[in-house]
Amino acid sequence: MLLVIDVGNTNTVIGLLDGEKITNQWRIKTDRHKTEDEFGMMIDHLFRYHGLTFHLVEDVIISSVVPPIMYALEKMVATYFKKEAIVVGDYPIESYLNMRYPNPKEIGADRIVNAVGAIEAYGAPLIIIDFGTATTFCYIDEEASYVGGAILPGIRLSLEALYEKAAKLPKVEINHPKNTIGQSTVEAMQSGLYFGYVGQVDAMVTRFKEEGHSEAKVIATGGLSHLIADESRTIDVVDPMLTLKGLQSIYDKVKQQ
């Protein structure tokens, strides 16, 4: 089986794949201060709960947007799984993703992995939206080449900034309000955050399609993708497993080289 680890700024997703089938998935808080032994024991607990052992893992692939965590993760893989981890970024991007981007090294591992997974699953052209700590938009043209994208603050980050910088505004939950016109401070904030963010997403997608001169399929992933897609007029598919699929695809391409 293939162990895949995707490290984001807020959460880390760990998955086990048997061929193309995702058999297990876990989401944990990203902690850049954990040691290799702490990572090893944590994964051991997750495995044991599901009746799994380290011996089932034949290989490991990691993508990360948090460089300080990589030493501990790679050492953990070597110590507990007796493997040398494949790390997205250690191989030329062009070997598994066509590029029209001027400087591919600038692209975060998360965006690369999502692009590979989406092209494999949905073809091209595509617009990929990942709702994480930041919300990222990636555009893939008709020839399945990575063209570029956009990055904006994630909805939770926007909420935290509003709460921290506006003294009289309370913390609120992110949900799908019934009405756009809020009749309390909490309702007004929830409306502004949710409908404002949905409008922002739809406006960005519209601009991407206009500049790309295509009716690209729009794929959403990440923690709040389902919530935003409920109201969005432009999101076609929500795929919460996209990153894990992308890691599996990159692993296959690397192994074929």
Image: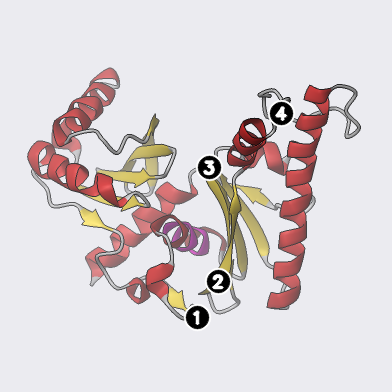
CA distance for labels 1 and 2: 8 Å
Mark 3 neighbour class, 10 Å CA radius: few under 14, some 14 to 19, many 20 or more: some
Residue assigned mark 4: 175
Classify mark 3: helix, strand or loop. Answer: loop
CA distance for labels 3 and 2: 22 Å
Is residue 51 depicted above or below 108 in this figure?
A: above
Q: Amino acid at mark 1?
A: Arg
**Is tag 3's residue or tag 4's residue first in the polypeptide sequence?**
4
Look at the magenta stretch and give its main secondary structure: helix
Residue assigned mark 1: 100
Q: Which disc is residue 148 wearing?
A: 2
**Is tag 1's residue or tag 2's residue first in the polypeptide sequence?**
1
Depth check: give the residue in front, 169 or 148: 169
Which residue sits furthest top?
Answer: 49
**Is tag 4's residue or tag 1's residue first in the polypeptide sequence?**
1
> What's drawn in magenta, residue-wise?
113-119
**Is tag 1's residue or tag 3's residue first in the polypeptide sequence?**
1
